[in-house]
Image (cartoon, rainbow, N blue to C red):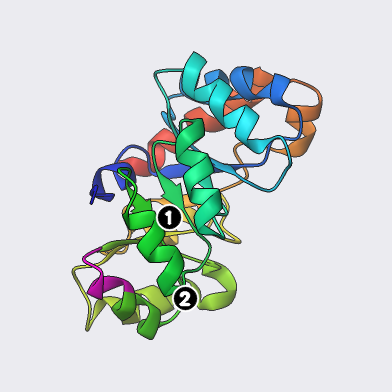
Amino acid sequence: MADASGVLRISPVIPVVTIDDPQDAVPLARALADGGVKIIELTLRTESALTSLKLIANEVPDILVGAGTILTPAQADDAVAAGAQFLVSPGVTPALLTSMLSLDVPVLPGVATVGEVMAVLESGLDSMKFFPAGPAGGPNYLAAIGAPIPHVQFCPTGGISLSTAPDYLKLPNVSCVGGSWLTPASAVAAKDWGRISSLASEVAALGL
């Protein structure tokens, strides 16, 4: 079982990205890397997502590419076959967790309740995605979880922006946050890779 704690320490923000056109995959990933963000969570929300993932894995070796929105064991298998270096799920079931843990990549299962955190802990994992972070309770909720379960590290995702990220990152049980603001749809549509690099460079200060 691969440890996911290292994944959480690569950047204070993990970009959560949905790519419609695979031709945008490599320049987008390079733009993030040029801005100092060396990790990307590519969601499996489009029919061409695995193609985009494979292109990034093959052509942008200086960025760690993971697959997000893993909902089924088959998706987990396909993502790893396409080159995914870590897996992220929005939630978790026993069957999905067992399947992801059978693959030799780090796993960030999604949790939203104390019971779900405890269930994932039983599998031996202590790094998790907290989703949807805003609606599920935000920083106050994560701080409360940290009292009885201080050894779990979270990557909260969902409803987080550059302005609210510090509220999460100051918590001792938050290693990084996930966010979609680094790759706005308007910038991708305009192929404004310079803007994405600039947005990526802004998050470096969050790690100070």
Q: Residues within 10 Å of mark 2 (few under 14, many from 20)?
A: many
Q: Eyeballing the image, is 155 above or below 113?
A: above
Report the residue marked by disc 2: 112
Report the residue marked by disc 1: 166
Residue 9, x across and y down, in percent? 29, 43
Task: Look at the numbered disc 2 and give the secondary structure of its residue.
Answer: loop
Asked if residue 121 lies in the magenta stretch, the reply is: yes
Q: Amino acid at mark 2?
A: Ala
Q: Toward the viewer: 155 or 46?
A: 46
Side (left or right) of 192 relative to 88:
right
Q: Eyeballing the image, is 50 above or below 100?
A: above
Q: Amino acid at mark 1?
A: Pro
What is the span of residues highlighted in magenta in the rendered image? 120-125
Q: Toward the viewer: 149 or 166?
A: 149
Q: Is there any visible trace of residue 77 in the rendered image?
A: yes
Residue 60, x across and y down, in percent? 48, 17
Side (left or right) of 69 relative to 37:
right
